[in-house]
Image: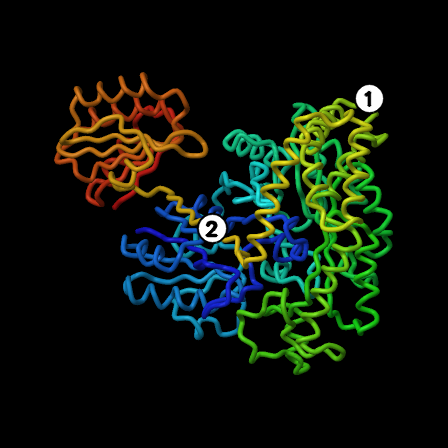
Amino acid sequence: MSLLLTSVFRPFGVDDAYGRKENKCELFHNQVTREQGIYSVRYNHRSFGLYFIAENLRMPTVVLDFPTLRQFRKELRKGYDYVGISFITPNFIKAKKMAEVVREVSPSTQIILGGHGTRIPDIEKLIDCDYVLPGEGISALRELFGEDIDAPIHHPVVKASEHKRVLGLPFGTGGAVLVPGVGCPNACAFCCTSHFFDKTYTPFLKTGEEIYETACRCGDALNSREFFVMDENFLKHKERAVELLKLLEKNKKKFSFSIFSSAEAITDFGVENMLKMGINYVWLGVESKRAIFEKTQGIDVKKLMTRLRQNGIMVLASSILFLDHHTKETIWEDIDFAIDLRPDFTQFMQLGPLPQTPVYLSYKAKGWLREEIPYEEWHGQHKIWFDHPHFTRDESEVYLRKAFQREFKTLGPSIVRIADTMLNGLESPLYQKDNPALRVQFERLRERCRIYFYALTGFKWLAMNRKMRKQTDDVIRRYEGYFGKRKLLHYLAGAGMALIGNLYRLKLKLGFEAHNPPRFRVSYRMMPRYEELCEKARTLLQNRRTWAILEPSTEGWALSLHFSGKINRKTVNALFKRLNDQVHRPIQSVRINVTALAEFSEETLTAFLERISHFCREIRIYCSELHQEKITQFLEKAQLNCAYSVVAV
């Protein structure tokens, strides 16, 4: 049995039979910095949920993220018992096409639909499939495959972002993603995430200690100390956050966290605690000037946001346009309110009645929903798909674009604003306190500012107008006041950035807009073919009856062994000699294929496994169904130094 988990196919951000150019596979350039031209922050995120599911099943699984349609067809030909397709509402037509391809290429494969798109009414009739599993996917698939739904959750090692660019230049390492839990009990009427998870919060990491240990493990694997925390309201779980803070203080960790949190939760946790923890960025839902949501009631959002930025914490403020109370006058009040908060980043989203949210159900009952509009246009960055009493669909596109343009014209590039915010942190009185945790975080912030200083000259030379040049020049003067006058290296770096930035500006003018992610393919518990391994791995041993391949992974090495005929002492000794000589990092897992063994003795195989168990953390044996029970029985008697499992193939 095997499972293929896949996202929908690329390209994204183009007008074709399957999508729209406005629906880019980029969080920031699509919804935040979209009108900032060359200053727009460009990067992609992986489909994190697929990796979580794959990590927490026993079934051999492959994750195929952002394939082309041709790559998807090729993967299907390898033969899978199940294919899980994850999609959001605007990608409905892509998911439908992929299901058709499955029926064509691999008719015996069963199709599972997952993701937010499964909330579309009668989705099982619209897309040819065998199962529809909305909501949290790990327990749903465990139940489907007869696995233990209460088994512990193991957090995968996944980069937070990929393909990061600004001004056409790569920046940052991407960091690691942390997902402490999914869902949100706040249940805002517009929020598809909250209602997708049935208005409940499901913790994957239940304690601060679990978050700390996971952060250390993922950070070590990716050689990073930066974490993007995918949790709808991270600080709302205060007891867990405080426990994490104490462990970070105790171990003097120089971690930095980017989080989502509400104004109420931030106020309760406190800005000083955020600095001690290393929180350097927060996504804060403002939504509207009117306190129509519980999370902002009784809180001076502007005062809170100013305090965050004064202490070096970057802020993204999100706002919703075309709410019920918006007219052509009041909508500008909300736009100007969001701008007046002076955040580092601003998200403007059109109100989007997505399936099964209270807004969707209400608008459908009132007859406001424009259900004839194809799902490809239900993404919130072009035109609304409902009848608003004061705006036509065409007007909604214009107002949204003008909101972003006014924000950029008033506040300037976000990459300049964050330079200002970071220096605020170095001058913050909170960092001057005699506190070890604050000293650790102060040094981290100082080093980040010192590096960022080299970029500011390039930002100035690329400025689009006098106001932007003055804004950047003012920030440069502040940095010079702290670090001293710019040196030759600052000007050389600026010249290089200006050259590349102008080339990138030309590229955008010529219409090269799409920033598509590459394809990712990750296998879990699969016994790979020898030819596939040789492309990226090290051959330790290869002869007529045995081959051993070392494959690099994010957490160490994975050793794949294939035996045929019988296991003999000479082959085993040769293998261990090469392991001792060539392997200087821990082996995460050993995958042993014994399906082709003509004979084996309990004594020989047990001795081999006991010896190999000292090299690794996990052993997985692939065998025929005929031998599965026998091998399991004598493994239970063996003195293994690691975890093990037996899989029938």
Does residue 133 lie above or below 556 as drawn?
Answer: below
The quarter of the displayed image where residue 10 is located: bottom left
Q: Does 116 sit left or right of 341 as displayed?
A: left
Q: CA distance from mark 2 to mark 1?
A: 44 Å
Among numbered discs 2 and 1, the one appearing first in the sequence:
2
Asked whether the beta carbons under mark 2 and mark 1 sit within 8 Å of each other, the answer is no
Tell which of 25 and 242 is nearer to you: 25
The residue that mark 2 highlights is 50
Considering only vertical position in the picture, is 630 above or below 394?
above
Give me the residue at 37% from left, 62% from top.
111
Q: How is the image coloured?
A: rainbow
Could you say whether the residue bearing mark 2 is in a helix, strand or loop?
Answer: helix
Amino acid type, residue under disc 1 in the picture: Asp
**In the displayed structure, does residue 603 sit left or right of residue 151?**
left
Q: In this figure, what is the number of numbered marks? A: 2
Q: Tag 1, which secondary structure?
A: loop
Report if residue 628 is visible in the image.
yes
Q: Residues within 10 Å of mark 2 (few under 14, many from 20)?
A: many
Q: Is residue 559 left or right of residue 45?
A: left
Q: Position of residue 356 (x, y in %)?
A: 60, 69
Query: Label 1, on which residue?
Result: 434
Provide residue 445's location: percent of width, then percent of height.
72, 30
Name which residue lies at 83% across and 63% down.
Answer: 290
Q: What kind of residue is marked 2? A: Leu
Quarter assignment of residue 348: bottom right
Q: Is residue 202 visible?
A: no
> Dot 1, how many residues are within 10 Å of its Cα: few (below 14), some (14-19), or many (20+)?
few
Q: Residue at x 68, y 26 (%)?
A: 488
Image coordinates of residue 330 in percent, x first then y, are 83, 69
Who is closer to the viewer here, 395 or 140? 395
